[in-house]
Image (cartoon, rainbow, N blue to C red):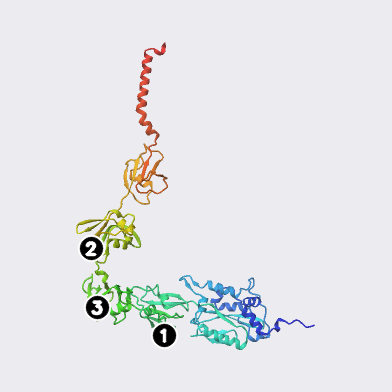
């Protein structure tokens, strides 16, 4: 009878296949011998030594011990179940946030980047199969960059990307243990400090990791006078390199926005000339000019070029350098030729042909935008128009200016003292309506306020009609009428009717032209009205009884 074939007699190729496919037994073995207790072990190289006594695969056992089979069983740390490598990696990923600056450090992102550099403070994981057992090592990287590959080799990781290091590690392991299914991945990326100084709010240290770019490190440290055109990064070995973030932002040249490295220091310079361009340009804004650059570069390079409506013959420079007076002066240019030199804080305005269009004024009950809030105010708005444009088109083009408070039916045009009636309601709500008037330069279109009222009657101190205010309740209008007359009204009893006579509840909002009637329901008020009659009757009865008593009527 043949003996059963033991598991050890399977070919190594079968073991490799099971390992790569994630078979249940192999996968559980992979994580069972991690020897790491928590995510903090990844950032503390000394923690590896703490787990060595409990795990023969933590890096202390030699290759000869592994081959000889003299490997003790892994019982984990006393009183704790051994934490799997998968759990440890998940815990490390969750802990990859620096609380003080919300710096997100993501091992998956690092693995997905072909440029991720080997960085001091990184922790990697190395696993491979030896004689049916899966050996797992936590591989920390210190500032020497001498990386120990189990007990097989030491590799210098300085200046290498993770992919380059991974290739070397795999070659070392496969040379010693062919077909061992080696796996090497990033367990926890490093976090390090970058000193930012120079023209910044204050010299400070910023948290960064190997995929942090220069722009993200300095973003919240700059002042109005900081220059992003010549930022110096001093590396750990003293090498200085200058970078221009404008080129990175505008041209997409990421070589000008490098990744940060441990030991880097960033020095931000002070801008010599910052100028502003606005008006008929494609990219208005405030820009940091380099030496020798003038108005031509400001408009064409920084401002993105002229807009289609630009009138290059009317360029204005506002200069406030104190040379003449505190209010500054204005310089007029008829073109970009000559590349007029600019001074610090100059503002360049490129005029538009639209500026030359005739205008009308719309005033009265119009909406204005103030700090992102639409307000209805008695205001004057300047509206440009094309020669010969009919008021129907002008009004519809600016319909956002009119609100519920606008009295559209009674608008009018004031043209050099003459009044021309204009029914804006027809223009806005009747698409077939065509106004009789064309817009003329300096017309004033007046839109009155539409005023509604609420009537207050009955047992109040001052009955009358009061201006309607949206979103106000009946208490507001009773208050305007002086309040209830307590001698006439009891319990604040009222009746509310709209203009069509429909009665609605006190809890409903008041609508325009409503009537609020305070009921006369006080008992004492009605008693007071009847008291003279009652008194007269009682007096007459009393007198009659007295006369009858005197006459002896009741003695008979």
Question: Which label was assigned to residue 335?
Answer: 3
Question: Which label was assigned to residue 440?
Answer: 2
Question: Which label was assigned to residue 239?
Answer: 1
Question: Which label was assigned to residue 309?
Answer: none
**Residue 272 in sight from this viewpoint:** no
Q: Is residue 340 left or right of residue 249?
A: left
Please name which of the two marks, 2 or 3, marks the residue nearer to the observer.
2
Disc 2 is placed on an element classified as loop
- Counting from the top left corner in percent of width and height, residue 438 is at 25, 62
**Residue 223 in sight from this viewpoint:** yes
Alpha carbon separation for disc pair 3 and 1 = 45 Å
Q: In this rendered view, identify the residue nearer to me: 384 or 84.
A: 384
- Counting from the top left corner in percent of width and height, residue 475 is at 38, 46
Alpha carbon separation for disc pair 1 and 2 = 69 Å
- Quarter of the image for residue 219 reads bottom left
- Counting from the top left corner in percent of width and height, residue 59 is at 60, 82
Residue drawn at the location 25% of the way across and 68% of the way down = 357
- Counting from the top left corner in percent of width and height, residue 194 is at 44, 77
Q: Residue furthest front?
A: 432
Tell me which label, 1 or 2, sits earlier in the chain: 1
């Amino acid at each position: 009878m043949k003996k059963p074939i033991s598991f050890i007699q399977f070919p190594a190729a079968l073991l490799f296949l099971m390992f790569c496919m994630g078979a249940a037994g192999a996968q559980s073995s992979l994580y069972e011998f991690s020897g790491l207790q928590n995510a903090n072990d990844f950032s503390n190289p000394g923690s590896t030594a703490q787990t060595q006594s409990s795990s023969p695969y933590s890096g202390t056992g030699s290759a000869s011990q592994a081959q000889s089979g003299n490997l003790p069983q892994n019982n984990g740390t006393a009183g704790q179940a051994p934490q799997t490598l998968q759990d440890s990696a998940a815990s490390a990923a969750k802990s990859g946030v620096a609380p003080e600056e919300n710096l997100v450090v993501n091992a998956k992102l690092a693995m997905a980047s072909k440029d991720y550099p080997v960085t001091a403070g990184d922790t990697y994981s190395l696993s491979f199969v030896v004689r049916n057992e899966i050996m797992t090592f936590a591989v920390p990287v210190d500032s020497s960059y001498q990386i120990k590959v189990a007990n097989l080799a030491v590799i210098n990781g300085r200046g290498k990307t993770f992919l380059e290091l991974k290739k070397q590690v795999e070659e070392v392991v496969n040379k010693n243990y062919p077909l061992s299914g080696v796996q090497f991945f990033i367990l926890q990326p490093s976090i390090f400090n970058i000193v930012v100084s120079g023209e910044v709010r204050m010299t400070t240290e910023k948290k960064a990791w190997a995929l942090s770019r220069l722009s993200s490190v300095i973003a919240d440290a700059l002042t109005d006078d900081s220059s992003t055109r010549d930022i110096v990064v001093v590396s750990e070995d003293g090498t200085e390199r200058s970078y221009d973030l404008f080129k990175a932002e505008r041209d997409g040249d990421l070589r000008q926005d490098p990744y940060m490295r441990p030991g880097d220091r960033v020095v931000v310079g002070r801008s010599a000339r910052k100028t502003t361009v606005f008006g008929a340009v494609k990219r208005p804004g405030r820009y940091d000019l380099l030496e020798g650059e003038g108005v031509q570069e400001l408009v064409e390079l920084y401002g993105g070029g002229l807009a289609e409506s630009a009138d290059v013959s009317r360029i204005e420079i506002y200069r406030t350098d104190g040379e003449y007076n505190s209010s500054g002066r204005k310089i007029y240019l008829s073109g970009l030729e000559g590349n007029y030199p600019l001074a610090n804080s100059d503002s360049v305005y490129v005029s538009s042909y639209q500026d030359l269009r005739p205008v009308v004024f719309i005033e009265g009950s119009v909406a204005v935008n103030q700090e992102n809030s639409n307000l209805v105010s008695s205001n004057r708005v300047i509206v440009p128009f094309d020669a010969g444009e009919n008021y129907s088109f002008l009004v519809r083009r600016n319909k956002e200016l009119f609100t519920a408070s606008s009295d559209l039916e009674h608008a009018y045009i004031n043209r050099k003292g003459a009044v021309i009636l204009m029914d804006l309601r027809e223009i806005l709500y009747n698409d077939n309506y065509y106004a009789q008037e064309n817009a003329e330069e300096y017309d004033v279109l007046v839109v009155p306020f539409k005023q509604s009222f609420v009537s207050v009657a009955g047992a109040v101190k001052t009955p009358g009609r009061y201006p309607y205010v949206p979103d106000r309740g009946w208490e507001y209008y009773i208050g305007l009428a002086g309040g209830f007359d307590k001698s006439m009204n009891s319990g604040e009893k009222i009746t509310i009717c709209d203009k069509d006579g429909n009665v609605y509840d006190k809890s409903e909002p008041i609508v325009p032209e409503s009537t609020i009637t305070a009921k006369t329901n006080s008992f004492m008020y009605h008693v007071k009205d009847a008291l003279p009659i009652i008194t007269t009757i009682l007096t007459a009865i009393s007198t009659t009884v007295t006369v009858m008593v005197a006459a002896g009527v009741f003695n008979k």
